Structures are given as C-alpha cells and as structure tokens.
Image (spheres, rainbow, N blue to C red):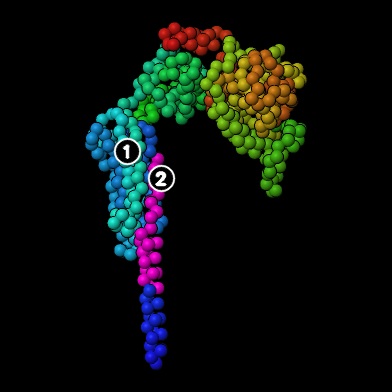
Amino acid sequence: MKMSFKKMKVWMVVILAAMIIVSIGWVWVVQLEDEKPIVDAQIPESLGRSFNISLDISDHRSGLRHIRAEILKEGQKKVLVEKEFPSDGILAGGKVHNESIVIDTKAKDLNISDGPAVLQMQVRDYSWRNWWHGNQASIEKKIHIDTKAPGIEVLTRAHNIYQGGSCLIIYRLTEPCQRSGVVVGDNFFPGCPGYFEDKHTMLAFFAIDYTQGSGTQIFLNAVDHAGNQTKAGFNYYLKEKKWKKDIINLSDRFLNQKMPEFDVQVSENSKNPLLDKFLLVNRKLRQDNAKVFKALAHKSEAKRNWEGNFIRLPNSARRAGFADHREYRYNGTVVDHQVHLGIDLASLAKAPVPAANTGKVIFADYIGIYGKTVVLDHGFGLMSLYSHLSSIDVQTGQLVSKGDILGRTGTTGLAGGDHLHFGMMVYETMINPIEWWDDNWIMHNITDKLKAVSEFVR
C-alpha cells in the first residue's frame, strides 16, 4: 500500500506538471501569440473634396480588438475612424476576425486645408502580448489634400459636326488629371496629351453616333488625381441627318452559298435552318463582332499617324452608304432590321485595296460577318477598317503608308458579291467616312485648328 501511495503521489505530480506545462504552452501559443493583424488598405495618393478609403482587416488568431485611422496635418489630428471590436471572453479572444471598412467623408467636414499630410492607421488584436495591449499593425503614408477642381480652357472655336460624323476639340487643363475628355450622351472620348509640347494641352477627337440627335448632351469632363471633377460646356453646332432606307431580299441561293461559312448552331426543331442561321449571324454574331472593334479602340496610340485626306478604293462605285437602315425580307416577309455602319465600294474582282492613310495595323484576321479584315490605327482614337477581303497582305504591328496595299477585295463574311466594306471609327463609335475623303473638310475642321493652337501653345 505504501508503494502504491508513493506511486500515486508521483503520478499526481507528473499529471500536475503536465497540466502546468500544457497551460503555459496554451497561454504562450494562444493568448501570447505574436502574429500582427493583417491590413489591406487602398489609400490614394491624393484626397479630394470627398474621398473614400477601403480597408480589409483581419486577425485569425486572437481576433480584432481596435482600429484607429487619422490624418496628421500641421500638428493637428483628424480622426477618420475609431472602432472597438467585442471580446468573446478573457480566454476566448475577440469575436470578430475579419472586417471590411469604407471610410467615406468630405475634407470640409474634417476642416482640413489643402497641402501635404500624413495618414496613420493602427490595428490591434486581443493577444496578451505587450502587457495585454495586443499585437499592433501600423500604416503611415504621405498624402496630399487637394480640394480644388481642375480648370478647363477650350482653345478651339468652331465645333461643327454632323450626326454620324466627327470633330476635333483642343483644350488646356490647369493640372494633371487622371481622366479628361468629351462626353457625348453615354459615350466618352478621352483627351490625350502628346501632340503639343505643353503636357496640359489635350487633343480629343469625338463623334456623334448615327442615333444621337440634337437632344444629346455634349460637354467636357475632367477628373483630377484627388477625384475632384469639372464639367464644362463648349460651343458646337450639330446638324441632324436622315438616313437612307434599303430593302434586301434574301434568296435561298444566297443562304445556301453563305451560311456554310458560319459555325452557328440552330435548334433541331427549326423549320428553316438556313434562314434561322442567317438571323443568328445577322443579329448575335454582328453584335459580337462590334465588341471586337470597340476593344481595338483601347490600342490606339496618342500619336498622329496620318496626313491629308483619306483615299478611297480607286475606280470604285458606292453600293451602300453609312447608316443605311436595312430591311431584310424573305419570300416577301420582313424577317430582320439592321444598320449598315460603313460604305460598300465595288471595283474589279479581287481589286488591290490601298491604305486610306498612314497608320499602324492593329488587326489583320477573320472576323465573323466582316470576313477577312484589316484595321489601321491613325492615332488619337481614329481608325479605318477594310472588310470582306479575299486576301490580307499585312501583319499586325506593321506600319503602312498611304496607298500601301493591304489586301484584295473579296466576298468573305456576309458579302453577297465582291466589294470592299470600308469603315471608320473614333474610339468605339463608327462614323461616316465621307468627310475624311474631303480635303476641304479636313483643312477646316482639323488642320486649321491644329495650326491656330500651335501659334500660342508650345
């Protein structure tokens, strides 16, 4: 019994020691954990009249305890946010382990003047470290308070534009901006530096979509790096146009000839698979192709790659015009409506197609209803496109001069006969090419403006 009692005492000591060691280990590992909270903060370089700062904070060990963010300027502290997070008990740590916070405020509410400042942020957790104050993650960043909106000075005078046409405006900003340009309804045309030595002088080509009439809002918009915004109107004259209506009669011969080119699936229950396939191509594929062209707008360089009037396909006759409103009929029944956003030019079969002006090839491939197509970037958002080609003789990235041969006319895509579909774009908006063929239009609307501004802007 005595030996048994001694053994029991030993075991009790061992167990007690183990419990103490485990407790100490648990306190050390859990309550005295040394991992700092994680802070993911989206802090802009400049803060404007109104601003927001997005924060994602987390602490997966002991939980979040406290956050404080403040701006220090000229010896004063302006608190943006201060928050205590609840405890789940002295041994359990904090209840909150993840939190997203958006600091949304106005400079005038904080009574902060413009100029340099410092943004400081501290986040603490529920660890017992640092005498129960917890682990702390800190952020300190130099920022600039800017509550003044940018100024816009319009340097060009006449802005005459036809519906479906284009125009040039030149303006000067009082400060660098993250975004500036012309707003036309729901469309935006960015202004770009680079043509003039003065980096604050911006050049912007803009366009009026064929659907936009006299009620369309048109104005300049600039947003600086602090988010301050200015809207400015300017003088312009918009002349509306009436578009031609055209009837296209679809034949079984045409459908049998063209539809095999398109990998489009129609319903097994279709009563007329060829016609249903055509309608899918003419509607859905046409929309998808338009998105491809719009995406090319973002590849345009802030550099003028052209000079003088744009040339048209030599010895050609016009077969269809810009914004022709087409009514498609099959066996006398109207089956579809679409708008033709280019000019169809017919010459000899497989006629050589010259570049309308100097530019850079940004697309040279097959594209749906347009078939084999080449797109040239002429700079500052101005582009020309050449479609239904039978062959392509240039490559993407290649620089071509006015008159260089891009390929040959053909019937690829949805073309019923050999011709060139010639189109022009200003950023994402298709425009009427006719004015760009006119030397006088270019002189009065483009060249004269550039010369006039160059006389007093370096």
Q: Residue at x 55, y 16 (%)?
A: 304
Looking at the rendering, the stretch of residues picked out in magenta corresponds to 18-42
Q: Residue at x 40, y 49 (%)?
A: 38
Rendered location of residue 441, percent (x, y) = 54, 10
Would you say residue 146 sits in the magenta stretch? no
Which of these two is toward me, 348 or 397? Answer: 397
Instruction: Check the image and report above or below for 216 versus 56.
Output: above
Q: Amino acid at mark 2?
A: Asp
The residue tagged 1 is 119
Would you say residue 23 sits in the magenta stretch? yes
Asked if residue 26 lies left or right of residue 295, the reply is left
- Does the image show residue 66? yes
Q: Residue at x 73, y 35 (%)?
A: 261
Asked if residue 115 lies left or right of residue 347, the reply is left
- Residue 1 location, quadrant: bottom left
Label 1 packing within 10 angstroms: few (<14), some (14-19), many (20+): many
Instruction: Check the image and report above or below for 58 versus 457.
Output: below
Residue 40's label in the rendered image is 2
Asked if residue 231 lies left or right of residue 374, the reply is left
Label 2 packing within 10 angstroms: few (<14), some (14-19), many (20+): few
Task: Give the farthest residue toward the bottom.
Answer: 1
- Does the image show residue 419? no
Rendered location of residue 215, percent (x, y) = 43, 24
| Of pointers 1 and 2, the one earlier in the residue sequence | 2
Q: Residue at x 30, y 33 (%)?
A: 117
Element type where label 1 sits in the image: strand
